[in-house]
Image (cartoon, rainbow, N blue to C red):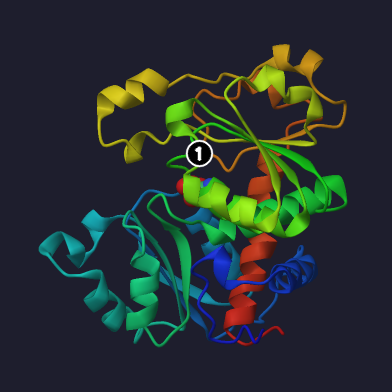
Amino acid sequence: MDFKNKDVISINDFSKEDLLHILKVARTMEGRRDTLLKGKILATLFFEPSTRTRLSFASAMEGLGGKVLGFDSAAASSFEKGETIWDTAKMVEKYCDVIVLRNPIEGSARLVAEASSKPVINAGDGANQHPTQTLLDLYTIEKVKHKLDNLHIGILGDLKYGRTVHSLTTALSHFKPVLYFIAPPALQMPQTYLDELEKKGIKFIIESNLMKVSKKLDILYVTRIQKERFPDPIEYEKYKGFYKLDTSLLSHIKKDLKIMHPLPRVDEIDRSLDETEHAVYFEQAANGIPIRKALLALVLGKAT
Ligand code: CP
């Protein structure tokens, strides 16, 4: 694929070869600080809160000599006065070379990409997709396991509303995994993703009790219950605190299990696990930098 001017909206838009190519370019971006993107401007349009995604995109851009403008909440933009995201995109494309968008509405990134002649990168659209998180997740798995194929991967937490696990499931389907979806029945992986796995012949197990499958796992990908996506706060109250991992887990896992989390965490992983050799979630967050440097360089035509 020619990545120049390409939008990054959904993992479905990328082949296995494309994903592996992005990881390869990311490896060349480790520790890189120079002027590769000098003269280029990134606009970060964040209509929802973010720590990692917004700051790591900004750090990636500035680390390669580019500049960053943008806003960090809907309230700080003219959306507050009734402006549509279509019109916002029509303005902002004139102010920058690449747009990174986070918005609570599913499909919003695709809409902004239609409005903008500049490349648009989806930094999370509602409960739908978070493709750049998935790329850094793959990058992390490859780093800690030295391979992507044939792994037993548990995905735990809010699989209904968690966008990171949706794009991750699609991406992992290229690598012949066995997937364990560990969630209360009401928060299980949407049927559309399970149908996709069935069609591709990927083995998956639906479970709510982590202990029943924990010994089989090479990777345990933990997510928080997505409070902000529940239409009914009473429903959220039922599931908050459903999973709380602590050092009692350690006698029920393989010696080389790695625990990942896209972060932020709430209470699903106790800090007592942070210092164990299993926890890789802070390293995972740091991997956002080489991945986002690679994506910016690719879509701006400064890497091939
Ligand atoms: N993982 C992730 O998307 O984190 P932020 O919401 O802080 O960007």
The N terminus: image quadrant: bottom right
The number of numbered discs placed on residues in the rendered structure image is 1
Q: Which residue is drawn at 72% across and 39% down?
A: 153
Question: Residue, x 79% and y 66% (percent of image)?
Answer: 27
Q: Which structural element holds mark 1?
A: loop
Can residue 37 be seen in the rendering of this structure? Answer: no
Q: Residue 71, image x and y in percent? A: 33, 62
Quarter of the image where one finds residue 186: top left
Q: Which residue is painted at 50% across and 77% down in the image?
A: 7
Can the viewer see residue 292 in this picture?
yes
Q: In which quarter of the image is residue 84?
A: bottom left
The foreground one among 289 and 247 is: 247
Observer-nearest of 209 and 24: 209
Q: What's the residue type where badge 1 is placed?
A: Leu
In-front residue for pair 177/85? 177
Position of 230 relative to 38 (above/below):
above
Task: Name the residue carrying label 1.
Answer: 159
Residue 224 falls left or right of residue 141: left
- Which residue: 43% across, 54% down? 128
Residue 253 in percent (x, y) is at: 80, 22
Give the percent coordinates (x, y) of residue 198.
63, 51
